[in-house]
Amino acid sequence: MASSSDQGRGGIGEGPVGGPWLIWAAGLALALLLAGLALVVQVRAGGERIVLARSSFTDTIGYQAPPPAPPAQASTAGRQVRLPNAPAPEWTPGVEPSPQRIATRVTWYALQVPPLPDDGRQLYLYIPRWKSDGSLAIYADGRLVRQSHANLQWNGSNQPLWIALPRTTVSHPPRILDIRLQHVRGIGGAFSSVWIGTYRQLAPRYYLREIFQVGLPAFSATAFLATGIFGLLVWFGRRDEPIYLLFFAMSAVCFVRMLHTFVGVHPLVVSDAWFGWLTVNSLYWMMIVLHLFAAQLHHARQPRLTFVILANSAAWTIATLPGLLDATLIAWLVYLNIIGLGLVVGVNAAIQSARAGARLAILLSAWCLVTLAAGVYDWALQQNLVNIESVFLTNFTGVGFTLIFWHIMFSRYVEALETATRAKADLARRLAQREAELTLSHARLREIEHRELLHQERQRLMQDMHDGLGSTLVGALRAFESDRAADLDAVGILRGCIDDLKLTIDSMEPVETDLLLLLATLRFRLQPRLEASGVRLTWNAGEIPPLAWLDQRHALHILRILQEAFANVLKHAGAREVALAVLAEGGQVLVRVQDDGRGFDPAGPSTGRGLANQRRRAEAIGGAVRWETGDRGACLVLVLPIEKAGSGAAYSSAPGA
Amino acid sequence: MSIEGAPPTPLRVVLVEDDVAFQEAFRTALAGADDLVVTGVAATAAQARALLSGPPAEVLVVDLGLPDGSGIDVIGEAHGRWPDCAIMVATTFADEHHVIASIEAGASGYLLKDSPLPAIAQDIRILHGGGSPISPRIARQVLMRFRPDERPPAEAAPVDKTGPSLSERETETLQLITRGFSFDEIAELMGVSRNTVLTFVRRIYAKLEVRSKTEAVFEARAHGLL
């Protein structure tokens, strides 16, 4: 049993480094090494073993303190027994649990010590087990050398005894050892063989047993509880995962159960009755938690079975409350019931977890069944049916449980980490995928947009060529063909065409909402013609806000409207001065072209196609043109909105051919 | 620096242009001017290089679209060989892309090919006299190139990288140009003489050229070429 637990510990301690086989092999090697070491220690250990004793008894009521010296006839009276001596317990010891009135018995063992070298060396007694629900007193050569002083029944009887014999200047090795056990009549009173020897001879035997029988269960139970508390804290943060709470509950009940293996040398804080109740019933609680924990692993819902387990456990828990049935006295019955219940829980968990393929649950339930087998053995030991010098196996299977539970939680932890890593990787992958999709769709949209833009630009330029350059050239061509060439200002027409072209090219460069830049470009283009014709231009470019809607398409319309306005001034007005003013006024930008020429009536019949074109272009960009005729000259006002509700409207209202 | 008074010796002008029609127009335009003389005409970049190894001219007029190379290279070479020569790029549309590339290569002005013939001679005189024309779009482009916040801060920080920057007056001049004002109007608005405004523009062109060179050096450094 020790080896299996060590094996498990190796598995946990090594962690996920290396393959599982390496871990198991290392664990096995470590276990074998420990077992070999224990064997060597036992073989090399020495000391005298006393197995013959004379035993006598006296029935008593309640518990009394031991006498100062053993009765004189003890070493000769009574019957010869062979140690370990374990009287068969009665099934129904007594019905009076009160320590004052309980039926008790004093059993005396008188042991003849073999002659030892009288060299004044310190001698020790080593007693592997004293199995007594009662008190103990040990006399050496008639003098009391040790007595139990804790509770009457839960008094550290699981712990091997290690007694340093009194050593003075006149002391000699003892010849007679008297042992007094006062125990419940019908149970207890068993006693193992007794070893006597020096420290070097006996210490290995004592410590080996002490470690495996007391130290290991104590250490494992405490460590389990510590991790259980950690689990409880985890559960506080993750209430929807009851497995952490169950882990804590398991560690807590295991700790309670294991208490009796390592406490009791000193008085307990609770009475024998309560301690017995705790110790015995913790096994039921363990069954409940085990059942629920396994259900967390194999995920099978078994409400009826759970109810039966709860009912059975609750019934015994209540029935054995102090004042009702005494758990200590009917322990054998309680333990038999537990073995039955454990069988149900273990087999059920094994079946369910095998069905669910839950590897950890299979391990747990298998260990549960192993523990049951150990429990049967322990029950036999408890009933003195096997050699009482052997050890309680469930102490070791309990250590195994600790390791298995650790392994389960450890696996969950590693699994959670892996899941998180996978989730992160998965998220990154999905993100990259989505990003790629978006990039693709963005590129497609861009392409469509680009194509659309190209299409619009082509439309715009074609429209412009058709209305402007094209029609001018065609007009000139027709004039040349029909002998009217002499009337034509050929240079003027060609210059006009080049100016048209320049403005078209200008309109292809972005102006970025800057109307003034657009107008400046226009001036730059028209300046040579204005200068040539001797018309003075006054430039009043005021501060205006940026026009967010101003794009190339709009730019060309504005350029053409104003180009036409200047052309009219030059051709028809006979003006000497023309002034361009730009100003912002009530949500609108006004561009005024004022000349000092003859003026004209925009509603008159001779206005021609030019004005209609200007009007149409202004409407196409969401603006308007109007003509103001004053005393002197004419004034064209181009009204543009500073902000447009929907810039898309401009595209839809493109000038029709 | 008088433009009206004819210098004792006429200005030597070299034309690099493959279009025969413009060559003719150019010759005609300058034939009418006593103070200008065409000392060489090259129709290809190779011919232009041959001319560049000869005695320097006062004015060089370069068309960008040459059959065997770019006029920009010719401008760059001429700027190196004839440092005192005023270089003009001959263009129909004075579009900002070509003009700025030429200025960066060392040109100090442009000549509109469709100008009336007398205007061509006058433009050459003005340029030689230190007056560089500048269109509103080119002014805006220059402003944008020198605007510090147009560039990412990490790139804009070191001074040696971005080269020279515009002075407040130069920036103001450019801004007024983008709003359509003429040199005379700008001079009046800024309370300076027309010549001062012309100086501003010349300086701006010079800075644009220096800047483009330092940027080229920086780019080369960044790419490990220097």
Image (tube, coloured by chain):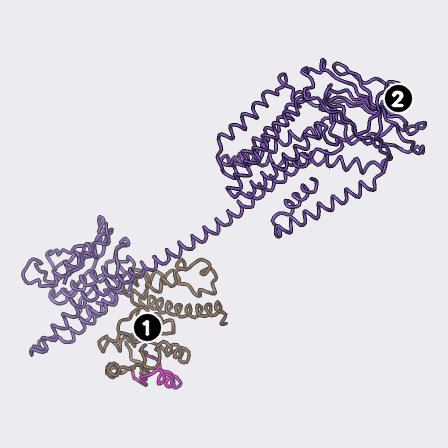
Chain colours: A purple, B brown
Can you identify the residue that label 2 sits on?
Answer: A76
Quadrant occupied by the N terminus of chain A: top right
Is A513 drawn above or below residue A299 in the view shown?
A: below
The extreme left residue here reads: A605
Please give left or right for residue A417 compared with residue A647 in the image: right
Q: Residues within 10 Å of mark 2 (few under 14, many from 20)?
A: few
Q: Is residue B55 magenta?
A: yes
Please give left or right for residue A413 compared with residue A152 in the image: left
Picture residue at 42% right of the left edge, 78% below the top: B80
Q: Residues within 10 Å of mark 1 (few under 14, many from 20)?
A: many
Percent x, y of residue A471 = 14, 70
Q: Secondary structure at mark 1?
A: strand
- At label 2, which amino acid type do we have? Thr
Is A344 drawn above or below residue A574 in the view shown?
A: above
Task: Read off the magenta span.
Answer: B36-60
* Residues beneath discs 2 and 1 located on the same chain: no
What chain is tagged by disc 2? A
Image marks 2 and 1: residues in contact by CB distance under 8 Å: no
Q: Is residue B188 visible?
A: no
Please give left or right for residue B129 compared with residue A144 in the image: left
Please give left or right for residue A273 compared with residue B140 in the image: right
Percent x, y of residue A12 = 63, 44
What chain is tagged by disc 1? B
Labelled disc at residue B109: 1
Quadrant occupied by the C terminus of chain A: bottom left
Percent x, y of residue A421 = 51, 49
